[in-house]
Image (cartoon, rainbow, N blue to C red):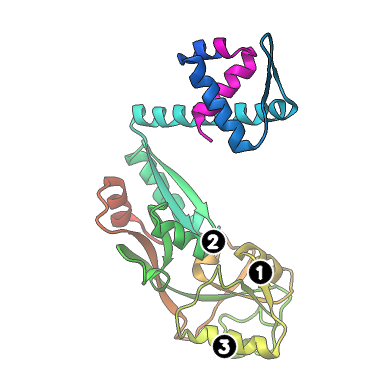
Amino acid sequence: MTSQQLKCFVHAADQLNFTKAAEELFLSVPTVTHHIKTLEEELGASLFIRTSRTVQLTEAGATFYTDAREILDKISLAEKNILKITNSDLFFLRIGCISTAELGFLEEMLYDLQTIYPKVYPQIFIHDYHTMKNLFCNKHLDMLLATREMIKDIDSCSFHKLKTISNYAIVSPKSHLSTKKELYFKDLENECLIIPLPKFLPFQNGNQLQEKLVLHSQSHFNLMCENDQAAILLAKCGYGIAILPEFFIPQKSDDLIVLPLKDEEDTFDYGIAYHKNTSTNYMKYIVRNFCFK
C-alpha cells in the first residue's frame, strides 16, 4: 500500500469521478484506475462500483475511506513537521532512562542546555533496560543513563562516569528498621523484600547482592514490581523493604526513609553512555558538564 494509491482512492471517493480525480492529481485516468485496482487487490475487496454512468463506494470502500484519509493526514503532518525542523535548523536530543527518578538528575543539565543550545530539543524515553539498550544499539537514542556494566558489550559505545553509586533500602516509618542509620543485608534476613523485575534492574555478572536476593527468595516471600515507583509505594505502605540502586531513588525523598546498604561489594559506576565519535557540539557539552548531584 502506497501513499499514491491512497491519494488516488481518496480523490476518487471525494469526486466519485475518476476523470476529475486524475485532473486533481495531474495523472492520467488509466494511472488512477491502475493504482485503485492494485489497492483493491492488496486489500482483497472492491472499493468502488463503476458503471458507464456512475461511480459509487462499496460498503468496504466507505469504511476504508476514513482510515485512508487519516493515514494521508498523518503523512501530511509528518512532512510538515520535518520541513519545519529542516527550515528552522532544529535538533533533537534523544535521552533514554530506566527510572523516573533519573528525570531529576537531568533537570539542571537540561536547564543549562536550553540556555546554551536553544535549538536543541530533548526527547526523553523511559522504559525497561533491555528496551532502552536495543534503542541505543540501533542509534534511536543519543545517550543513555546506565551503569558501566549495563553497556559493556555494546560496540562503538563510550561511557562517561558520573558517580560511584550503591544500593539502598526503602523502609516504612512503621518498620522496626526505620530507626537505623544504615543496613547490612543480614539485617533483612527475615523481611519481605520488594524488588523491580530483572528487566528493570540488570545486575552485574556475579554480583553478590543478586546472589543474596536469589537465596532470600528461595526461603522467603518477596514481591516483584513492574517499576521503581511501585516498589517505593509498597515499601512506604509497609508491605516490605524495597531494594533499589541509587538511580531509582527520587532526589526529593524527604517523605521516604532511605537507608544505605553498606555491603562493600554493592557499588558500581553510573553515568552517560553515548556513541563514539559523536560530532555534535551539544553532546560534547553534555559529556563535559553533566554532573550528578
- Magenta-highlighted residues: 1-20
Q: In this view, does 104 lie above or below 194?
A: above
Query: Which of the marked residues, 1 or 2, is nearer the chain's N terminus?
Result: 2
Question: Secondary structure under badge 3?
Answer: helix
Q: Which amino acid does label 1 sit on?
A: Cys
Q: Which residue is drawn at 66% across and 11% down?
A: 52
Question: Secondary structure under badge 2?
Answer: loop
User: Could you tell whether 25 is left or right of 47 in the image?
Assistant: left
**Occupied quadrant, residue 288:** bottom left
- Of the pair 19 and 175, the residue shown nearer to us: 19
Give the distance between the C-alpha atoms of the residues marked 2 and 3, in whole angstroms: 23 Å
Q: Does the magenta stretch include residue 131?
A: no
Where is mark 2, residue-wise?
A: 99
Q: In this view, does 164 lie above or below 95?
A: below
Q: Which amino acid does label 3 sit on?
A: Lys
**Occupied quadrant, residue 148:** bottom left
Give the distance between the C-alpha atoms of the residues marked 1 and 2, in whole angstroms: 13 Å
Where is mark 1, residue-wise?
A: 225
- Of the pair 52 and 278, the residue shown nearer to us: 52
Type of secondary structure dominating the magenta stretch: helix
Give the distance between the C-alpha atoms of the residues marked 1 and 3, in whole angstroms: 18 Å
x and y percent of residue 187 in the render? Answer: 62, 88
- Of the pair 215 and 291, the residue shown nearer to us: 215
Where is mark 3, residue-wise?
A: 212
Whether tag 1 and tag 3 are in contact, CB under 8 A, the answer is no
Q: Does the magenta stretch include residue 3?
A: yes
Question: Secondary structure under badge 1?
Answer: strand
x and y percent of residue 185 in the render? Answer: 57, 87
